[in-house]
Image (tube, rainbow, N blue to C red):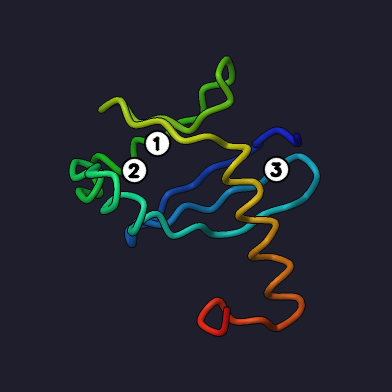
């Protein structure tokens, strides 16, 4: 699986991910945050503290929330393909 090379948060609970193979894109984490009860991440001052743990290959926050970069890679890849094929997530 390609390694994550860059992660940048924005103020709408989205992150921009870039992987070493050139795959990149935005992921909206708002539903994941709601579904899993990660309420502390709704505060941008906490959400913006995201970092990449190279030892575990996970995205992490100081509050203890962790996310698998491999699963996020698959999401970014799929969203990128859907955009190229002009498929809307609303139509799926």
Q: Residue at x 58, y 37 (%)?
A: 69
Q: Secondary structure at mark 3?
A: strand
Q: CA distance from mark 3 to mark 2?
A: 19 Å
Q: Residue at x 63, y 56 (%)?
A: 76
Q: Is residue 22 above or below residue 78?
A: above
Pointer 1 and pointer 3: residues touching (CB < 8 Å)? no
Q: CA distance from mark 1 to mark 3?
A: 16 Å
Q: Quadrant of the C terminus?
A: bottom right
Q: CA distance from mark 1 to mark 2?
A: 5 Å
Return the x and y of residue 72 as percentages of the image width and height. 57, 46
Q: Is residue 64 above or below residue 84?
A: above
Residue that label 2 marks: 48
Q: Secondary structure at mark 1?
A: loop
Pointer 1 and pointer 2: residues touching (CB < 8 Å)? yes
Return the x and y of residue 34 as percentages of the image width and height. 26, 53
Q: What is the quadrant of residue 62 in the picture?
A: top left
Residue that label 1 marks: 50
Crowding at mark 2 (Cα within 10 Å: few <14, some 14-19, many 20+) = some
Return the x and y of residue 83 as percentages of the image width and height. 68, 75
Q: Is residue 8 above or below residue 55?
A: below
In this rendering, would 21 be left or right of 25? Answer: right
Judging depth in this view, the residue of 19 and 88 nearest the camera is 88
Circle on res. 41: none
Q: What is the quadrant of residue 51 in the picture?
A: top left
Crowding at mark 3 (Cα within 10 Å: few <14, some 14-19, many 20+) = some
Q: Sequence-wise, which precedes: disc 3 or disc 2?
A: 3
Residue that label 3 marks: 19
In this rendering, would 37 be left or right of 55? Answer: left
């Amino acid at each position: 699986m390609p390694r994550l090379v860059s992660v940048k948060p924005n103020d709408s609970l989205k992150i921009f991910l870039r992987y070493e193979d050139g795959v990149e894109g935005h992921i909206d984490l708002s539903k994941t945050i709601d579904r899993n009860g990660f309420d502390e991440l709704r505060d941008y001052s906490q959400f913006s503290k995201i970092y990449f743990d190279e030892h575990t290959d996970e995205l992490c926050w100081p509050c203890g929330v962790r996310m698998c970069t491999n699963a996020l890679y698959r999401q970014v890849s799929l969203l990128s393909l859907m955009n190229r094929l002009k498929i809307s997530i609303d139509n799926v």
